[in-house]
Amino acid sequence: MRNNTTPGSGDGRIDMGDPDIDIPGDGKLSKASDPSAPLMVVFGGVDVSTIPSGQYMWNYMNTIKNRFHIFVAQSNAVNGPHSYRSLMSTLKAQGLTPSKQILYLFSGGYRPGMDLLVGGGPALFSSIYLVDIWMGGTQVPDFYKALVDANTAKITYVYTTFGANNGKARDYIANKLGSQRAILVEGKGMPVHMSTNTVAVRTIQ
């Protein structure tokens, strides 16, 4: 497992950015200049200091807005499949034709991610990023372990020692993916948890 001990410059800052299109009830879409640019589909976590993930996730995604169309869900409480369908309708209406789709799940984004990824959901995406994904309880860790088993080649896992809330699931996924696709961000506390986004975004191609 690869270590990355530098939290990154994005830690602790909240910046809504300048998204172009509001998708009411689901999130916001930022358009790249190239209609065929890849699409990033982002489901973030819970509120941080009352700021929803639909705002704070732009702090990290703004750095790659010129290369990707980026959708950020308004919160982790959205319905994943509904948001995705709304996004696809918006892309069509805007004449955008992404060359590929990338799914990005941070922390509490596990919930809409699970709903979207059931059945044939993984086939929609060329890459899936699990970024300090929460895996407490019993059903959630089993789901994500099975997801990694079936889609190892397309998954990248960026994590801390504490964010998963399930050491066995965390280590299972990290060991399954190996040092090139599992990146450990060392340290404790909310700034380190949030910094996994900085590390993850730097790896996106």
Image (cartoon, grey):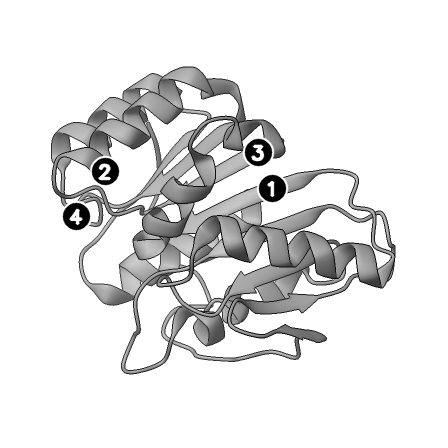
Q: The residue under label 3 is which amino acid type?
A: Ser
Name the residue beneath numbered marker 2: 140
Q: Which is nearer the N-term, disc 1 or disc 2? A: 1
Can the viewer see residue 16 in this picture?
yes
Q: Which is nearer the N-term, disc 4 or disc 1? A: 1
Q: Residue 152: x and y, percent?
A: 45, 19
Can the viewer see residue 205 in this picture?
no
Q: Residue 44: x and y, percent?
A: 41, 59
Q: Marks 4 and 2: in contact by CB < 8 Å?
A: no
Q: CA distance from mark 4 to mark 1?
A: 25 Å
Horizontally, residue 19 falls left or right of residue 79, namely right
Q: Marks 1 and 3: in contact by CB < 8 Å?
A: yes
> Measuring 46% from the left and 33% from the top, which residue is drawn there?
156
Q: The residue under label 2 is which amino acid type?
A: Val
Name the residue beneath numbered marker 3: 127
Q: The residue under label 4 is which amino acid type?
A: Phe
> Measuring 83% from the left and 54% from the top, which residue is drawn there?
96
Name the residue beneath numbered marker 1: 102
Q: Nearer the viewer, residue 186 or 40?
A: 40
**Based on the displayed image, in which of its 4 quarters is residue 114 positioned?**
top left
Query: Circle 2 — which element?
Result: helix
